[in-house]
Image (cartoon, rainbow, N blue to C red):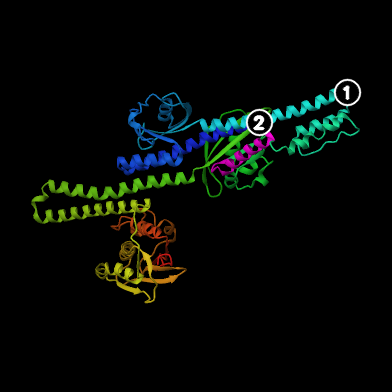
Amino acid sequence: MFFAARDALVDRHAEAREDQARLVAAVIDLDIQRDIAANAFDLTIVRLGTENDVRITVIGLDGTVIADSTGDFALTENLAGRPEVNEARRDGFSSAEQPDETGETRLFFAAVEIASVPGAVVRVASPATELDAAIGRLRRNMAITMGTAVLVAGLVVYALAGRNLVPPQKLRNVVGAVDAGRLDSNVEIGGGHVLDEVDSVPSKTAGAPSSPTSGVERDLGRFEAVLQRLTDGVVLTDRNGEIMQLNEAAERMLGAPMAAAVGRPFVQIARDHELAQLLRRALAGEEPAPLTIEYGLNRRAIRATAQLTRGPGERLGLMVLHDETELRRLETVRREFVANVSHELRTPLASIKALVETLEAGAIDDQAIAADFLGRIVGEVDRLALLVDELLDLARLESGRVALRLEAVSPAEVLTRGGERLRPQIERGGLELRFALPADLPLVRVDPGRIEQVVINLVHNAIKFTPPGGAITIAALTKNGVVEGSVSDTGAGISPEELPRLFERFHKADRARRSEGTGLGLAIVKHIIGAHGGAVSVESELDHGSTFRFDMPLITAVDG
């Protein structure tokens, strides 16, 4: 059992380093894509290293250290020859237990290649001292327990030396009680035998205030607590594949409580032939590669690893399940973001290039054509500037770096100002602007400029999709402890399948793909209202218009 517990601790430690390395690589990859400043990049590395209690090193193509969470990377030697770096460049990932560059400290390393910069590597390192200490404590306590058992057995043998005619069955009762760990029982010998003095040894041992067994139980209890708090699912099976133990994360992933899972075959609980085959291969002595599957009805991405653990007289199967669904989603969002930005930039740049080439070919000599083309170029440049401004604004909102200037204001005044700023565009579109703002609305605590931005974005969106003769209504009411603002139109409406993705960056409904918008307005609305602690929602029906609603918090007693 010691070997199984030790192997589980080592594997869990390695898995934790791998998960941290992959997450850090994903964050750094996103920062590289955004081309953040060098000092901000260094601060990110230091923050990630401090939060995770590890050393993070970013290694360039030539082996030089670009950034290090300790801050002294300028003094670090070239790491091009380190085996974990070369393995990560070759296979995309490596994990090893090796001395550090000084040779003085034994470290656990996990290295991952950065996706957007092939050859660049992120390495996460942590000292092995904490793990060694935990294994040492476990070995020490188990040795104490074995010594106690041997001592008790020795007392029994010594007592038997004085009485050769001890009934064998009664002797087996004493030894059996000690071997079974029933230290609180009192096995009776009877008959005035010399072993009558020994029969109380188990109960006396159980009542001893400094029993070594309590230390083992305490450490095992701590290990069990750590196991239950792991975010990864851990399943332990016997040599036949029947479940012996699983933690809370595994219960959630597999959808089976421990009481119903223990003692049953893993394949019955997992209900997945790929996971079952992975465990069977491990129990057969193979070393199967990690497997990533889509598991369950909700098709969550689960990365599973299985291995055989050996102990004195036993063979156990250890299955570790890591939920990568959120990581996959973030990776998909990142890819879509890059693709969408590229698409939005390509169109105006191609238009500007075509206009300039036409002017260079001789059109610049025609004053009327030249003026028209220059006007178009200015329009495309304005569109690019708007896109960049909105991207920066959205990035600040998403990162929480925008400081709201909260004030106690009248919601009717803020909503009216936002609508009136677009009245000229509304009238040019042949639309009517209406207000439904009760005079008794309570004050709200908001950033007036940001709420006006919300109203402008929603009204501008309504203008684009409402035909002449329609109406746009700005309204508000008190509801569930907030003032709920809304912008309604009588336009084209939105199809039901488009509604769930409406507030995503760059998402445009089918009817909006020809519009001049960037697809960022509704995403900005969502994050502004979220920064105020509110929510935004939409109701729409095709050909019958749409209504966007958003919350504004009321003034509280604490606000004064």
Gap between marks 2 and 1 measured at Cα: 33 Å
- The answer to which quarter of the image holds residue 551 is bottom left
Q: Quadrant of the C terminus?
A: bottom left
| Pick the front one: 511 or 278 | 278
Look at the picture and state if 149 lies above or below 361. Answer: above
Amino acid on which the number 1 mark rests in the picture = Asn
Left/right of residue 151 with respect to residue 307 in the rendered view: right
Q: Secondary structure at mark 2?
A: helix
Q: Which mark is residue 142?
A: 2
Q: Residue furthest right?
A: 191
What is the span of residues highlighted in magenta in the rendered image?
Answer: 211-233
Amino acid on which the number 2 mark rests in the picture = Met
The residue at which mark 1 appears reads as: 164
At x 16%, y 46%, the residue is 357
Left/right of residue 303 with respect to residue 507 in the rendered view: right
Look at the picture and state if 540 lies above or below 88. Answer: below
Who comes first in sequence, dot 2 or dot 1? 2
Contact? badges 2 and 1 (CB < 8 Å): no
Q: Position of residue 328 (x, y in %)?
A: 45, 44
Q: Position of residue 318 (x, y in %)?
A: 60, 35
Q: Residues within 10 Å of mark 2 (few under 14, many from 20)?
A: some
Q: Residues within 10 Å of mark 1 (few under 14, many from 20)?
A: few
User: Can residue 349 be seen in the rendering of this structure?
Assistant: yes
| Pick the front one: 313 or 150 | 150
- The answer to which quarter of the image holds residue 379 is bottom left
- The answer to which quarter of the image holds residue 152 is top right
